[in-house]
Image (cartoon, rainbow, N blue to C red):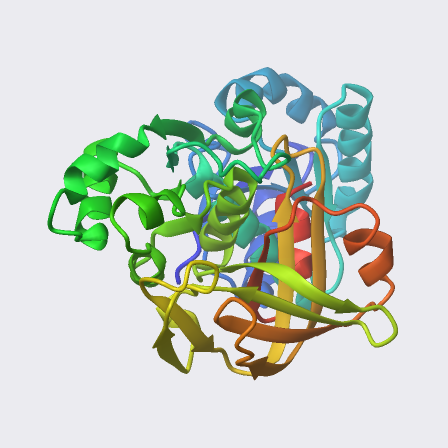
Amino acid sequence: MKQDIAIYTLTSELYDEKAVTTMTTAFLESLGIEYQLKGTDYSDYGSHALNLIYVRTGGTEGIFRRLLPELQNKSQRPFYLLTSGKSNSLAASMEILSFLRQNDICGEIIHGDSDYITRRIHLLSKVEEAKKKLCGTRLGIIGEPSDWLISSHADRAKVKEMLGIELIDIPMQELLDEIGDTKQIYESLKVLINRYQLQGFTLRCFDLLTTVKDTGCMALAKLNSEGYVAGCEGDVPAMLSMMIVRSLLDISGFQANPSRINPKTGEMLFAHCTIPLDMVEHYELDTHFESGIGTGIRGYMKEGPVTIFKVAGNLSRSFIAEGELVRNEAKPDLCRTQQVIRLSDKSLTTSYFLTNPIGNHHIIMPGHCKQLLEHLLK
């Protein structure tokens, strides 16, 4: 995917422009990234996913200070100061960053060899693009959180302020009216998605068992694989976690709860009765575990590296751990999709899961993604 990177420049008038231009060309070409060079035209600063200020020379501190009010009006994102280190540019960058810190403004100097700078820019670009996607996202809460989710609510103001996500309440009866006698849960959910212009939702799905005598497991599995976020049981923090994963990595997440934990080995068994169809190599259909009715999905995900993730409903904390999916299981006494995951840090089984968890549901995704998630949540 093409990255939306804009580079603006700061240059002292004391330096020879021709020499600085030659230096600029050589430095930026060494990075091997796609970018738009804006120079001293800051008119669209903040409109790109990643906005870099290339401090080309020393003596630019005063120029930046004069620009700062205009730049802050255009964007509230951190200031990323790119520097090659030539012509006293690193010293100037450090003075600028010190000034920003004194004024409680976030920033970072991007400096090092070309390989480090390139990797850092790619990471920041992904993170800033994800934040841009999240801003303005609309997520539905269809029905209230299930009665047993006593800790899984959200601080709407914090979610709006920190992620730019708007939470939309949708009565369960509205979905039931759409389902009517047809029992087309998937189509009815699509109607609500279009009606409320949603990028995702969480569903109080157990209500379907008593009203229409069916489950939402297959509908949620399909909708997730189509690029929506579709969560279970009205769990809002789990839905937010899935949305973050979708925006950052463009992949689905598996919402599941721990069923068994072995602190000695660091192995955990996660289970749930649905999983996005685009996450599995193959799947089988069974009944929903707790009720024994409707359809549950037993999905088999590829073994290998995984990341476990969860944010709190007020975004005050998060949990991110890497591990390995060592095997899929199919025990009859558990929710149908079952994954045995061995944590890289087995101490987390007790220090987090058995001592200080964020609710019961957690989001599992393929690959080791801890670094990207940590940077997005800074």
For the C terminus, the image quarter is top right
Q: How many marks?
A: 0
Q: Is residue 368 visible?
A: no
Residue in view at x 40 percent, y 64 percent: 292
Q: Quadrant of residue 299?
A: bottom left
Q: Is residue 325 left or right of residue 201?
A: right
Q: Is residue 168 left or right of residue 241?
A: left
Residue 209: give x, y in percent of width and height.
34, 50
Residue, far left: 182
Residue 210: give x, y in percent of width and height.
33, 45
Q: Is residue 339 left or right of residue 113?
A: left
Residue in view at x 49 percent, y 23 percent: 74
Measured along the vertical axis of the image, is residue 13 above or below residue 200? above
- Viewer-side residue, 57 vs 222: 222
- Viewer-side residue, 271 vs 67: 271
Residue in view at x 14 percent, y 42 percent: 180
Measured along the vertical axis of the image, is residue 184 above or below residue 132? below
For the N terminus, the image quarter is bottom left
Residue in view at x 47 percent, y 31 percent: 45
Residue 197: give x, y in percent of width and height.
25, 35
Q: Is residue 28 left or right of residue 137?
A: right
Q: Is residue 57 visible?
A: yes
- Viewer-side residue, 375 vs 111: 375
Residue 56: give x, y in percent of width and height.
66, 44
